[in-house]
Amino acid sequence: MPVTSVFDLSPAEKIQLVEDLWDDIASQPENIPVHDWQIKELERREANLKSHPAPTISWEEVKRRVRAHNAV
């Protein structure tokens, strides 16, 4: 039975289609439009982080904590 619409695809086929589309879009990030309001929001968030730095932990520490939690 031929597929006439993406809505006729199975859930697994829809997921694969979305993954394929995302990979195609992500392969050329310079072609993704970024609006002025998005740039301004990113600048606002960056300025906020610089003026109010949050404590951070390393990726190794994150993994250690997750493994310790899962061992319980």
Image (cartoon, grey):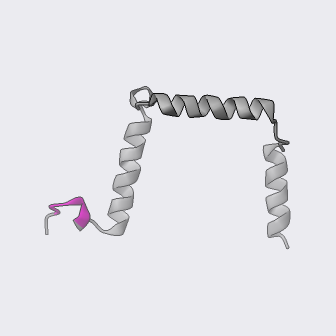
Magenta stretch: includes residue 6: yes
Residue 20 falls left or right of residue 63:
left
Residue 13 falls left or right of residue 37:
left
Residue 42 falls left or right of residue 2:
right
Q: Residue at x 75, y 34 (%)?
A: 49
Residue 45 occupies quadrant: top right
The image shows residue 14 at horizontal and vertical percentages of 34, 61
Q: Residue at x 19, y 60 (%)?
A: 5
Q: Work out whether residue 62 or residue 33 is closer to the camera in this orientation and state it.
A: 33
Q: Work out whether residue 37 or residue 13 is closer to the camera in this orientation and state it.
A: 37
The image shows residue 3 at horizontal and vertical percentages of 17, 63
User: What is the magenta range?
Assistant: 3-7
Residue 28 occupies quadrant: top left
Q: Residue at x 73, y 34 (%)?
A: 48
The image shows residue 29 at horizontal and vertical percentages of 45, 31
Residue 68 occupies quadrant: bottom right
